[in-house]
Every structure is written in C-alpha cells, then in structure tokens.
Image: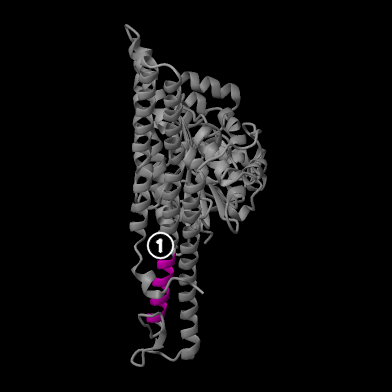
C-alpha cells in the first residue's frame, strides 16, 4: 500500500526537495575551507612547537581535518538522494495529472481523496461507468505507488547516512583496485563487494580512481569528481602562471593563454551548472583539463532513468565550449520531457576523446578510431551500473562525432538500442547492417543547407593534395564526385544506407537543435522509442 496519498502528492513540491539537496551539497565548500584552515594551523604549530604535546596536538588536528574531508561525499550524497526523490515525484505528479485529465475527458470526477466518480452532467456512455472509473483509478494507483516507492527509497538511504554518522563515514577497503580501462563488469563486481563505508573511503581518498572507472555507479563517480573540481581549476591556473612567466610571451604562448582562458571559462560554467538546484540535476562523470580538455556530464541520473541519451559532439569540441554542447543535450532532454512527462529520461554529454581542431585532422578517421574503446567501455558501464530494468540507450553523434559513434559500433560494439547521426560526413560504414544495431533503430538526418552534404570522398593521395592546396575544399568536396558517398562512407541519411531518416529544417551544420526544427523532435522521439 502506498504511503503517499492523492492530496499529499498533488501538493508535493519537487523543487523544494531539489533546493534542500543543493543546500546540503553547498556545505562542501565551507567544510573544505575549514579543512584548509586546519592544515595551515597545523603547519604553523609544527614550526613553533615541539615535544610530545605538540605531536599529540598535530595528530588531533590531522584527525579533525580527515573527519571534515570524509564528510564531503556524504553531503553530496544527500543532494543526490533528494534530487532523485524530486525527479521521481515529478514523474509521479505528471502521471497524476494525466489521470485527472483522463477522468475529465471521460466525464468522471476525481475527488480530494483520490476517489473516482461519475459526473452525471457530463458522462458520455461510450463505455460502462465502472470500466471507465477503473481505468482512471489504475492510472492514479500507478502515480501514487511510484511516489510511495520514491519516498521509501529516499528515507532508507537517508537513514543509512544517519547511521553512518554515528558509526563512522568511512573505513579502508581491502587491497586491490581495478586497472585503468578494466571491463565495466569487473569494475561493477569489485564495487558491489565493498561496504558503504569502504566506498566512501575510496571516494574521499582516491577520487581520481573512482571518478574515471566505467562500471562504478553514477552517483559515486559524481561525488568523486566533484571533489576534484578545485584541483582541476588549480591545474589550469598553474598553467596560466607558467605561460605568463615567459618573457617575452611570443605568439605561441599567446595562443596557449587564450586556450587556457577558454578552458577556465568552460570549467567555471560547468561548475556553476553542477551547483544549480534546478531540474535536472547534473552529474559529473569525468573531466580532464589537459590539452583541449575533456568532460563527461549527465543531466539526470542515467542509473535510474528509463531512457538515456549519450551525445558525442564533433570537430573543435573541447572544455571551452562544453557548456554549449551540454546545452544541446539539454534541449533534446527538454523535448523528451515535453513529449513524455511520465517517463524518466537522462542525457549525457560524452566528450572523452580528442576531437579534431582543424580540417587537416578531420580528414582522417584516426581520432575516431582512437575514441572507440573508450566509448564502448562507457556504454557498457551505463548498462551494468543501471538500477532496475534496463534503460533504452541511444547514442547520438553530430558531425565528426557521428564517425566516432559509427566506428565504435562497427569495430567494438556499443551497448545501445538506437544510433542517431546528424550532420554526418559518413560513419565509417557502407550499410547500416555493419553497425551491430537493428537497422530500424539506426536513424539519421541532414539539413538541406548543411555543408557536410558536399563532403564527397577522395582517395588518400587526392585528399592530401586537396587539403594542402585549399583547406576549405575539404568541406566543399571534390567537384567531380556524385552519388551518396560522403567522406567516410555512405551518407547515413540516404535511404539506401539501410537505416531510417527523420527530417530537418534549414539551419546549416549546427541548427539541428534550434527551437522549432523538426530534427529536435526527431531526436527526442528516437530517445523515447516512439
């Protein structure tokens, strides 16, 4: 029997739970500052005091510092629990509203206690009144049961945290760690064999390990990676100081300085999004500020969603423009919520590869091949860490990102129920049957004014000559070619490729996410499976 009644669910405020969770997570900043102050105080103490009493005081300060540090993952976990509760309540409220609308359309009335009755003035006897009422009542029960289950799960997890506060947040795990790049199934088995206290120890003491392991639950990776945000920012600031120390800086240093500034701005924008209390909550699954920068971030919790989108961006993508790329994933997610408010969906920006920066790099499939194993592992990790019935997983590639997705699917296999290619220069395959996903779940779209349509193939010698003579020609194509062959194989938006096609309005190479573009609804409907 559900513990949440009709009136209670109708009045529930998911936004309030989200705000409360964000406030708890916000305490990580003050606790980190206090730990730093203790570290500074201990350093001063050691410099001016010695002896047994000084040693004991130093040890006590270290213990206090460790206690402050170890509580940070728990503060983030509270935020996760309350955000998860808010998400599930939002879905339950949407189902409740659907039941009320269903009753109204049938000439029925839902009273304040959730009872369903006939409205004699409006009921149309197209079906028996008891049958219509039972149908509405079943929808209501589904909504209330979902809310009750969400309430119980959140209460149990918060009770576990409260017990841990008395018995100790963390304890050391046994020796042995998965190697970098370990199979997600092995990682998941290792993680499942640890106690909650051991997991918190690893998150607090070895966040670099936990945060990057595919197969570790999303919540744990998010906690670990959030703890490293300050470290990553310090790395970029140190890089900027090194460049500024060069006298004279020179043109190359100036270019690098602009790059560091862009990555800092991108990191700060992502950090701001992580602190936002609004829906959906963001989960940080990976970040690397080196080079052009890499990031993997989810909107909504993939481990508890019914539908999960992984979006792989294309050429020039890096940490500097990651907030904009995340915005594209968010727009697909928004359309999913509008089209199916009773479903729980999540979207992931997967930018964990070295995207080409120049046309000379984009002319080669090398960077796509290099990305394949990592994308394969990530999708496998999503599958094994998911809680409950398997989610529908969709992988979407844009531009060069579509080649990354296609090559990974063909050469390594992807844990995906559907593949989507937009603005594609080819996916490294001549037919949909090569990609390991049923052809009726392989989708593509190409805008009528997308310049990528002109990216026709040339042989390797001709390609090099073409790029050397006129880089723009790499995009505009080889003038003597015709047909449906693009730079990296058959155009996936051609029906002859063997997949399915959805339409796009005009908008050039990047307009697929523009409001009102039918391609946006097309992407969302594939994610939903409709």
Viewer can see residue 524: yes
Give above or below for 158 relative to 358. below
Q: Is residue 70 magenta?
A: no
Left or right: where does residue 262 sit relative to residue 378? left
In terms of secondary structure, where does tag 1 sit? Answer: helix
Q: Residue furthest front?
A: 52
Q: Residue furthest top?
A: 247
Left or right: where does residue 310 sit relative to residue 241? right
Give above or below for 245 relative to 419. above
Which residue is at a point 42% across and 63% down the rendered structure image?
89
Residue 88's x, y, as percent? 45, 61
Give above or below for 290 relative to 301. above
**Label 1: how many Cα within 10 Å (few below 14, some 14–19, many 20+):** many
Q: Which residue is mark 1?
A: 90
The quarter holding residue 13 reads bottom left
What is the number of callouts on the image? 1
Left or right: where does residue 455 sit relative to residue 36? right
Between 83 and 336, the one nearer to me in the picture: 83
Which residues are the magenta region?
92-104
Residue 433's x, y, as percent? 66, 48
Which residue is at a point 40% across and 67% down the rendered structure image?
93
Residue 401's x, y, as percent? 51, 38
Q: Main secondary structure of the magenta part?
A: helix
Residue 192's x, y, as percent? 63, 46
Q: Is residue 93 magenta?
A: yes
Instruction: State the colouring used for the structure image.
Output: one colour
């Amino acid at each position: 029997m559900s513990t949440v009644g009709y009136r209670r669910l109708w009045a529930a405020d998911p936004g309030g739970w989200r705000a409360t969770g964000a406030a708890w997570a916000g305490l990580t900043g003050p606790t980190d500052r206090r730990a730093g102050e203790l570290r500074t105080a201990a350093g001063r103490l050691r410099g001016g005091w010695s002896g047994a009493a000084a040693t004991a005081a130093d040890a006590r300060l270290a213990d206090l510092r460790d206690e402050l540090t170890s509580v940070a993952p728990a503060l983030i976990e509270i935020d996760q629990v309350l955000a998860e509760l808010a998400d599930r309540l939002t879905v339950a409220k949407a189902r409740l509203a659907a039941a009320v609308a269903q009753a109204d359309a049938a000439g029925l009335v839902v009273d304040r206690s959730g009872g369903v009755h006939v409205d004699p003035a409006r009921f149309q006897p197209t079906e028996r009144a008891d049958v219509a009422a039972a149908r509405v009542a079943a929808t209501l029960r589904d909504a209330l049961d979902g809310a009750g289950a969400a309430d119980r799960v959140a209460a149990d997890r918060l009770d576990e945290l409260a017990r841990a506060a008395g018995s100790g947040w963390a304890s050391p795990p046994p020796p042995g760690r998965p190697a970098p790049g370990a199979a997600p199934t092995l990682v998941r088995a290792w993680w499942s064999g640890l106690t909650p206290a051991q997991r918190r120890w690893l998150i607090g003491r070895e966040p670099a390990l936990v945060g990057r392991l595919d197969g570790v639950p999303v919540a744990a990776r998010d906690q670990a990676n959030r703890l490293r945000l300050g470290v990553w920012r310090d790395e970029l600031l140190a890089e900027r100081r090194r460049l500024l120390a060069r006298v004279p800086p020179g043109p190359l240093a100036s270019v690098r300085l602009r790059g560091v500034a862009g990555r800092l701005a991108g990191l700060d924008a992502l950090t701001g999004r992580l602190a936002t209390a609004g829906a959906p909550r963001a989960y940080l699954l990976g970040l690397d500020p080196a080079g052009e920068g890499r990031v993997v971030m989810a909107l909504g919790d993939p481990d508890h969603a019914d539908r999960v989108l992984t979006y792989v961006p294309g050429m020039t993508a890096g940490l500097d423009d990651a907030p904009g790329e995340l915005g594209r994933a968010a727009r697909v997610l928004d359309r999913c919520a509008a089209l199916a408010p009773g479903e729980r969906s999540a979207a992931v920006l997967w930018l964990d590869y070295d995207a080409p920066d120049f046309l000379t790099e984009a002319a080669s499939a090398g960077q796509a091949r290099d990305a394949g194993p990592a994308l394969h592992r990530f999708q496998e990790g999503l599958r094994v860490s998911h809680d409950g019935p398997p989610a529908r997983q969709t992988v979407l590639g844009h531009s060069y990102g579509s080649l990354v997705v296609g090559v990974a699917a063909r050469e390594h296999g992807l844990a995906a129920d559907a593949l989507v290619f937009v603005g594609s220069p080819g996916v490294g395959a001549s037919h949909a049957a090569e990609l390991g996903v049923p052809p009726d779940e392989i989708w593509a779209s190409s805008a009528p004014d997308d310049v990528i349509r002109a990216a026709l193939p040339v042989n390797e010698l001709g390609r090099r000559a073409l790029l050397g003579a006129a880089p723009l020609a790499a995009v505009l194509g080889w003038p003597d070619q015709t047909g449906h062959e693009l730079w990296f194989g058959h155009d996936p938006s051609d029906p002859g490729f063997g997949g399915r096609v959805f339409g796009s309005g005009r908008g050039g190479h990047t307009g697929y996410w523009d409001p009102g573009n039918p391609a946006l609804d097309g992407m969302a409907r594939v994610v939903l499976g409709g």
